[in-house]
Amino acid sequence: FSGPVPELQLASQVLHVLFLFLPLLWALGILPPLDALLLWGMEQVLVFGLGGSPMSSNLRLLLMFGVSAGVAVCNYFIPSTLGVVLFSISTGYLLSLDLSQVGTLCRGPRAAFGDRGFRRGGSPPPPPSSFGWNLGCRELLLYLSLLLVAMAEAGLLHHFLGSVQSQSLVTGPQAPVSYLLLVLFCLCWALREIQGAYVFGGVLLNPLYPKGMSSVQTFKQRNRVLYIAAAIRRVLLYLVSPFAMIAFLSMDKSLQLLHKASLSVGFTRAFRVVWQSSEDALLQMVVVVLVRLAAGNNMLPGWDNLGTGVQLLLVGLLIDRLTQFLAKLKFTVTVLVTSWTEKKQRRQTAGTLLALNASLCPLLLVVVTLSALLSAPLLPLFTLPIFLVGFPRPQRSWPGPVGTACPCPDSIFYQQMSGSLASALRTAFARGSLGSLAPGSHFLGRFQDRMVWIMILERGYGYCTVNIKGLELQETSCHTVEARRVDEVFEAAFERPERLGFTQGFNLHWGNALTPCAALAVRVYSDARNVLSGIIDSHDNLRKLQDDFLKALVWLLLRYCVQKHKGFLWRSEEGPGVGGRKSQSSQLAQTTCNQPPEAVMLESNVSSLRFRQDSSSLTSFGDWSDEDDLFGPQPARRTVALVTAEAQPGHTALQTGASLPGSVEMDSLFENMALSALQPLQPLGLGIGMPAVDKGRNPEVFRESPGSLPQLNFSCPQSEVFNLPTGWRTAPLLPSRLLQLRPLFPEDWFWFTLGHFGPDVQGETSEDMTKALKEDEALKELHAQVALSCLISLGAESAFTSPSYVYRLYCGDIPWTEGLDWLSSSKELYQLALRAFRFSFKLLFDQASLGPMESPEELFSTLEEYERDWYIGLVTEKGWHDSVLQEKPFLFSLGHDLAMV
């Protein structure tokens, strides 16, 4: 340079002063890291300078920023204003769509349509990453039609009316469109306002919103009027308003001065934000129209010279910063007030800090204003009413990838509900019941003891990307108090009775940080805990358990034969685990889960979400911890879970196991651990352990080899279908022992069940064939031998007398018997026996609660329902997790709580 440059000298002076404060800024956490500063700068330029939206990932932000900046540069060099209008509309529309679905469409129509219609009875669809239309052939035609109509409208209006000069908005070509925009804004605002539980910023209860959440059907019927209003609003906002705003911009006279950098950027943003955020663009355009109407025929030199595009940019930036200032000012006042009114937050220095904030009120306002201007977080230091400005960063609160951060037994329930919740949110976003959505908004979902935190990451034309996170349960007293407070806010909004007076129309929790928004229908499991005192310790019920076990086992054996004949493979992963699992428990609690669509309430900084469910069924839990002498005196011990890996053909299963079948639990010196939980010791040359093996005795005396078994002579040819594997007849039990238990076998039930399963395997239904099956004694003796062998192997040849023994059998922790090794050697038979016992226990509970079965037909249909609609097992089993993801209607489990008194 030939001489000093004033601008560089000024920059040098400012930087010299700034460098002095860098250590202080770094210590206070205001100085941002370089990567956060760059991402924040790109996000601010993309949103307010180029009309885009905050992106859901850093890669999407970099790509979108580069493409959007390239569009603005191209607009600067395009010589024709008509070309600029058409190019801006086309690129703005395309960039406002969810272009990530193009890859899904290219992979094939099956992927594009999301496998719709192929998931009945299977696993639920995965939670979508964005909400709105799924990109397919029909959607492409719709998008193309909208784009062509928008370009034709803008081109014609700009060609014929764009050059008309008028000093007044009242007499110019934009006048009719301006009044139309005002009417559209008022209608859209009113229709959106009546969709939520509160109106006027959460001050008053909405009189049109349905009262009570007794059932989903009733709620939807009462909400029908609001559905119609929401449909009208959606048409006005997403179809009528964009074309009205395009017409307003296409006829603007400042388009003739496009070859300026500011005007080029302004109109690039204006034509894109019409699609990217139609509701915000409508508000900004209405503000510009009101300013012009207020000015009338008078000129505003500084304002009019900016051009419409830059005016819209400034209005959008001003509205955003003003909104942030008011929200952060409310947050500041809330922290100051609660630091004194809440006892747990009141400290000895609370009065001093409040007096300090009051005396330094101008400085506090400066901190809040600076935080709003920088779009940076406002940080209360150590939760004290001392506020600092956090460093600027992108709006995403959780920059990490989506996934399970802390796996726990309830993670599977959050995973199951995410798809249904995403679908419900899509409907709520389209209706406007959650208010004006903006990236960075937070919502809190609440259902029973579960909470979901929802954050909007990205928003465009017809889609909205969100992040859904399940929160920890109420495991501490603080969590319980917080959850109860949230419930009180919800109850005041959604469970209010008929209003008795004018004062009940006000929101009593208006000052709360959470304002209830709406109720949504979501498919989710409901939990119910039940104590089995008086049921499992009843001797009458325990005596009935043996008979129910044999009936359930006979039903499962015959069903197994039918499935095998039809070619169905036995799915062992859905059945109970071979080794079983022992949950740390004591009071028996079983549960079943029911998930019909239920009402859900949503809440954020102005909203929250809550599920309502009417369910008379029970739900299951894994680990309880109650103490009770229901099972007799038991030594207190801590069970240590083993991790066992079982390799199977084609896959490897990793399980957390409990005591192995055949092990004996006793007190040990290893910190009260069960001996079965210890790693096995290496043999030292002595044959010590259980079961003892007499090497001097020929094992064939007690267990016949499959080759030495007598040939079965069935009298009916169809009986071969119901033949059981040969290995299932080789139980090491004396024939006299089986003969002694022979009267326990339910012959009438066997013939009844065989009569129902017989037609399933016959080509033609024949009464003679069915009669021949029922007269086949060899078939009956075969099933009797296998069923009674399983009964002895489970140690249940005498009636069940101990609730603790019933619980151990349910968990698969079977004490050693002489037939257990034989039963465990056949995986399929072991699963059938364990499943039969669990079915019989469920029958015991149902009959104790609802009354005994009145007929064999009722018992048969009940077992079919168990097989079809229930998962009966333990929460730690893989089948439980698979059933939750497949949305089995009911789940049932058993727990044992050592801490219950």
Image (spheres, grey):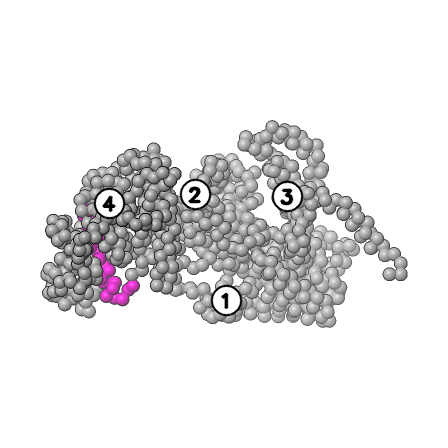
First of labels 1, 4 by sequence position: 1
Q: Is residue 146 left or right of residue 18?
A: left
In depth, the one of 11 and 574 nearer the eye is 574
Q: Position of residue 501 (x, y in %)?
A: 48, 35
Tell me the magenta residue range: 546-569
Rendered position, 732 above or below 105: above
Q: Which mark lies nearer to you, 2 or 4?
A: 4
Residue in the picture at 54% in, 32% down? 344
Residue in the picture at 70% in, 44% down? 25
- Residue designated by label 1: 104
Q: Is residue 451 left or right of residue 821?
A: right
Label 1 Cα neighbours within 10 Å, binned few <14 / some 14-19 / many ≥20: some
- Residue designated by label 4: 844
Quadrant location, the N terminus:
bottom right
- Residue designated by label 2: 449
Q: Is residue 27 visible?
A: yes
First of labels 2, 1 by sequence position: 1
The majority secondary structure of the magenta stretch comes to: helix
**Within the image, what quadrant is residue 292 found in?**
bottom right
Q: Helix, strand or loop at disc 2?
A: loop
First of labels 3, 1 by sequence position: 1
Calculate the distance from the C-alpha at mark 2 to the C-alpha at mark 1: 36 Å
**Within the image, what quadrant is residue 677 found in?**
top left
First of labels 4, 3 by sequence position: 3
Q: Helix, strand or loop at disc 4?
A: helix
First of labels 3, 2 by sequence position: 3
Calculate the distance from the C-alpha at mark 3 to the C-alpha at mark 1: 40 Å
Q: Position of residue 233 (x, y in %)?
A: 53, 56
Residue in the picture at 43% in, 59% down? 125
Rendered position, 492 above or below 701: above
- Residue designated by label 3: 378
